[in-house]
Structure formats: C-alpha cells, structure tokens
Amino acid sequence: MKSQLFYEFNPKAVEVSQYFMFLKKLERETYNPERIRSQNPVIDVYFNQDIERTLKSAGFLLLYNLIEGTIRSSIQYIFDHISSKSVSFDDLRRDLKLIVLKNLRNKSPDKLIQSINQISLDIIAETFDANDIFSGNVDARKIKTLAKNYGFSSQSIPMTRDGADLLDIKRQRNDLAHGIKSFNEIGKEIPSEELFRIKNRVIIYLKYLIINIESYLENQDYLDKSSEKSSR
C-alpha cells in the first residue's frame, strides 16, 4: 500500500500500538514496585490498579479516535480523488449521486454559487464536508453502510471478526465521553491482554479497509459502469 491514505494511517496506528505496548509493560511493573524504584532512584513512582484501569480505559479512546479518523480520512480521500480526476456528476454511480445531492441540501446556495463554475464537476467537491459524516457513532455496521453506498468492499480476513470489536469500542468511548461510566469501571471490566488483542484486530481491519478503498479507486468503481456500456 503506497497511497497517501496509508501513509497517513500508518504513523497513527504505530502511535496507538506504542501506547498499548507501554500499557502492557506498565501492568507487569505495577506488581513489582521495588524494581521500578531501583530503576528510578531519584523519582519515587507510584503505581496502583486504579491508575492501570484508567490507562486501559483511555486505550478505548485512542482506538475510537483511530477508527473514526481513518474512516473520515478515507471518505475525504475518495472525494479528493474523484475531484482530481475531474469526474462529472453525470458519470457517478447512482448511490454516489444520491450522496452528493444529500450533501447539497446542507449547503448555502449563496456560498455555492461563488465557488461553482462548472456545476457537473464542482458540485462533487464543493458539497462534501467530512464533519457531516460522523458524530461519535462509527462501528462496523456504519462502515458497511458507507461501503455499500460508495461502492467499495468492507470485507476483511476472518481474524478481524468482521469488525465486531468496533461496536464495543464505540460503546465504551461513548460511556466515557458522556460520563455514564468512570475510567476505573471500564478498565476493571477488561484484561489488558484482551485489550491488546482487540487493538491488533482493529488495526488489521482498518488496513484491509484501506486496501479495499485503494482497489475501488484504482478500478474506478465510483463510476456508473452502465453509462459506459451505453456510450459504446
């Protein structure tokens, strides 16, 4: 994978992985405070289970941020690609046309008329706003709906469990964001090893999604293939 989309995703995924590696090491050190003090003779570092649980809960926030950020960037990438290829609205697949028209409803006509010169070309980019896609509700079901509407595949490999972890991550993130549960409560409910496995599955799931989108763009599956047949 060599697209800009992958190059943006990779360092973010590494950042999340490093956090979980730190968390894993921290859990081992938590039960050996003498080792910590011997390695840090000047600073008396204090660890306990409450801190460990809080940090585990924060892992859900990092994972959700990676998921939503990746999907948001992916949809933006699709629109940027289509615009860079000067694709006309008339040539888009039907579901994509519906998305553009729905986006149009949220735009001010006064602002649009200042930025649109060729409506069949400019309407695609000018009506898109990545901020309108999500609102703290990204899970595998949402991704599959987006994939169906845009025309790219949401399939992955079996070990990712078809993105099933995303629903739990979303719920945990929302419980934290809205104060429904404390960091301690959520961190107490899941072992670090399981959280680590969830992180691995999510990153692989997102990587396969990026591969699918790259293939979608390379094959120009955003186009209405029936219009190509009728023009021959």
Image (cartoon, rainbow, N blue to C red):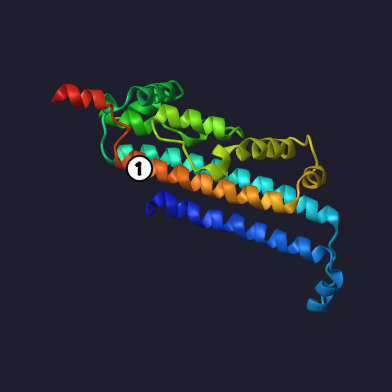
Q: State whether residue 3 is above or below residue 181.
A: below
* Residue 170 or residue 118, whichever sits in front: 170
Query: Residue 172 at x, y = what percent?
Result: 71, 39
Instruction: Say left or right for 133 vs 45.
Output: left
In this view, the residue farthest toward the front is: 158
Instruction: Say left or right for 133 vs 78.
Output: right
Q: State whether residue 198 is above or below residue 115.
A: below
* Residue 216 or residue 12, whichever sits in front: 216
Residue depicted at x 27% and y 31%? 121
The residue that mark 1 highlights is 215
Query: Residue 49 at x, y = what percent?
Result: 84, 55
Q: State whether residue 120 is above or below residue 167.
A: above
Quadrant housing residue 147: top left
Quadrant housing residue 25: bottom right
Quadrant housing residue 168: top right
Instruction: Say left or right for 32 vs 105.
Output: right
* CA neighbours of label 1 inside 10 A, class few (<14), some (14 to 19), many (20+): some
Residue depicted at x 30% and y 27%? 92
Quarter of the rendering occupied by the C terminus: top left
Query: Residue 202 at x, y = what percent?
Result: 57, 46
Q: How many marks?
A: 1
* Residue 177 or residue 141, whichever sits in front: 141
In this view, the residue farthest toward the left is: 232
Query: Residue 139 at x, y = what percent?
Result: 58, 34
Q: Amino acid at mark 1?
A: Ser
Instruction: Say left or right for 154 vs 35.
Output: left
Residue depicted at x 64% and y 47%? 198
* Residue 131 or residue 92, whichever sits in front: 92
Q: Secondary structure at mark 1?
A: helix
Q: State whether residue 124 is above or below residue 176.
A: above
